[in-house]
Image (cartoon, rainbow, N blue to C red):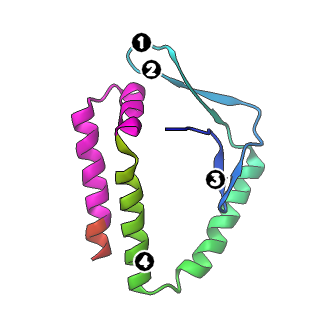
Amino acid sequence: MTIIGHNFIGGSRSAQGTTLLKSIHATTGEALPYEFHHATEQEVNQACEAASQAFKTYRHTSTEQRATFLENIADELDALGTDFLEIVSQETALPLARLQGERGRTSGQMRLFAK
């Protein structure tokens, strides 16, 4: 799994912030090899504006389109695989079995809402 550490704003990657947030192993306190760019105030404002613009389109979508949207998110979440869960486990100290259940519950709820 490749982790890039950029912010996604309006469908594009952004990494204007010079401060990097390090991922930390929850049980050892050691730094993990993942860094994330801290969003600048400008990036936060851009994200808010992009969300506002996206809502103007999204609010006119049909229930079928919204259902497909939720199902696609659930599919993407499930497709992340065990690499994703192992990283989350390192960062949270939660066992893999719990994280598998949480992921299944979340994607299951999205699919339920899609119905």
Tell me which amino acid carries mark 1.
Answer: Thr
Query: Is residue 94 rendered magenta in the image?
Result: yes
| 48 left or right of 112 in image | right
The kind of secondary structure element at disc 1 is loop
Q: Residue at x 67, y 37 (%)?
A: 38
The kind of secondary structure element at disc 3 is strand
Main secondary structure of the magenta stretch: helix
Would you call the spot at circle 4 few (<14 residues within 10 Å), some (14-19), or many (20 or more)?
A: some
Q: Earlier in the sequence, mark 3 or mark 1?
A: 3
Q: Earlier in the sequence, mark 3 or mark 2?
A: 3
Would you call the spot at circle 1 few (<14 residues within 10 Å), some (14-19), or many (20 or more)?
A: few
Q: Residue at x 44, y 20 (%)?
A: 25
Height in image: 101 above or below 36?
A: below
Separation (CA) of disc 1 from disc 2: 6 Å
Tell me which amino acid carries mark 4.
Answer: Arg
Could you say where residue 90 lies in the image, as x and y percent from the top left?
39, 25
The answer to whether the residues at label 1 and label 2 have Cβ atoms under 8 Å apart is yes
Would you call the spot at circle 2 few (<14 residues within 10 Å), some (14-19), or many (20 or more)?
A: some
Q: Which mark is residue 66?
A: 4
* Residue 69 picture quarter: bottom left
The residue wearing badge 1 is 28
Q: Residue at x 40, y 47 (%)?
A: 80
The residue wearing badge 3 is 8
Q: Earlier in the sequence, mark 3 or mark 4?
A: 3
Bounds of the magenta segment: 82-110
Height in image: 42 above or below 15?
A: below
Q: Quadrant of the C terminus?
A: bottom left
* Residue 110 picture quarter: bottom left
Separation (CA) of disc 3 from disc 1: 30 Å
Would you call the spot at circle 3 few (<14 residues within 10 Å), some (14-19), or many (20 or more)?
A: few
The residue wearing badge 2 is 25
